[in-house]
Every structure is written in structure tokens, then in C-alpha cells.
Image: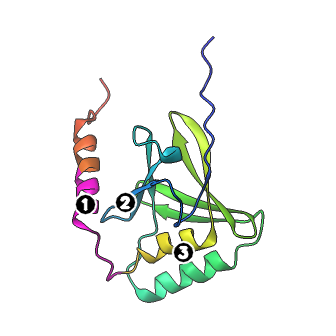
Amino acid sequence: MMSQPLILAPRYRLDDEINWLEGIDPSRRYWLAVNGDRQLKVVIPGLCVTSSQELKDAILKFRGLQPQEKMVIKRPFGQLIIHCVSVNCYAIEARVEGALAWHLFDKETIESFLLTSHPDWVPSPRDVELGRKLLELAFEQPAYAV
């Protein structure tokens, strides 16, 4: 009998020694190397706003999260769910090889992610390529079921 692999997601921090953040593409999706493994990546939909006020409201909502509460950010293609696990420990859900995993982050890292949704934020040229890569993958998928 084949079983699902056990995926353990460590607590990522901006000052980690392992390079876990691949980038943040122009549509504000977060590209992560799971456990720092470049062969095992996840793409998580991030916050996308149209105004500075909307960003401020989202950050204040995030800062108000208490342990056991969650914040759901809906996107056209998916959603971002941030769980407050405990003080300064937050989890973001993402599937890794079919298994649901919670990737753990500190407050500073989540706030940094959210700040990239500012309307004036400009991704690096490398991060623009991540967005193109996801589009290429989408075009490889069948448009309809046969």
C-alpha cells in the first residue's frame, strides 16, 4: 500500500541560513522551496490590493489575529489562509506533493509578504520570470477534459 509522504515544514524566517524564498511574482504569489529543497517548490497565492488603504486594513487585520484565529484572503485562483498558531508563529497552508502542509512563519516574515501587495511594489526581473514560468505551466494544461 502506497502512503502519502510525510512533509514537515519548518518555521521560516527572513534571516534563515537556508534560502527558502524563491521569489514573489508580479501577481503576488509567494514561491517557496520546501525545507530549502530547490526540487520541491510550492506557489502560494498572496495578498493583492488596489489601494494603500486596503493594504493598511489587511495588515491591521493580520496584526489583530489571536492564537487559534485565521485570516482568509480570497484570490481569483485560490486563497491564502493565515493561521495564528501562537504568539509570533503563523501558518500558511499549501499542498506539497498532494499532502496538506502548514508552513510556519514569524510575524515579520508574514508582514513582509503582505507589504509586497502595495500598489507601488515592483518585483525584481528574476521574480517576473517566476510569473512567466507559471503562465507557461498553465498553457501546458488541457483546456477541457476529454
Residue type at mark 1 is Arg
Quarter the C terminus occupies: top left
**Mark 2 surroundings: few (<14), some (14-19) or many (≥20) residues within 10 A:** many
- Start and end of the magenta stretch? 119-132
The quarter of the picture where residue 12 lies is bottom right
CB of mark 3 within 8 Å of CB of mark 2? no
- Please name whichever residue, 146 or 121, is drawn nearer the observer in this view of the structure: 121
Q: CA distance from mark 3 to mark 1?
A: 22 Å
* Residue at horizontal 28 percent and vertical 75 percent from the top: 122
Look at the picture and state if 121 lies above or below 125: below
In magenta stretch: residue 65: no
Residue at mark 2 to residue at mark 1: CA–CA distance: 8 Å
- Dot 1 falls on a residue whose secondary structure is helix
* Residue underneath mark 2: 23
Helix, strand or loop under label 2: strand
Q: Residue furthest bottom?
A: 53
Residue 45, x across and y down, in percent: 44, 58
Position of residue 57 relative to residue 133, above or below, is below
Query: Between 102 and 21, which is closer to the camera in this rendering?
Result: 21
Of the numbered discs 3 and 2, the one sitting upstream in the chain is: 2
Tell me the colour scheme of the image. rainbow
Q: Nearer the viewer, residue 68 or 122?
A: 122
Residue on which disc 3 sits: 111
Q: What residue is at 26 percent from the left and 68 percent from the top?
A: 124
Q: Pick out the residue farthest to the front.
A: 17
The quadrant the N terminus occupies is: top right
C-beta proximity under 8 Å, tags 2 and 1: yes
The percent coordinates of residue 67 (x first, y second) are 77, 66
Q: Earlier in the sequence, mark 3 or mark 1?
A: 3
Instruction: Indicate whether residue 126 is drawn in magenta.
Output: yes
As shown in the figure, which amino acid type bears the numbered disc 2?
Answer: Gly
- Identify residue for label 1: 126
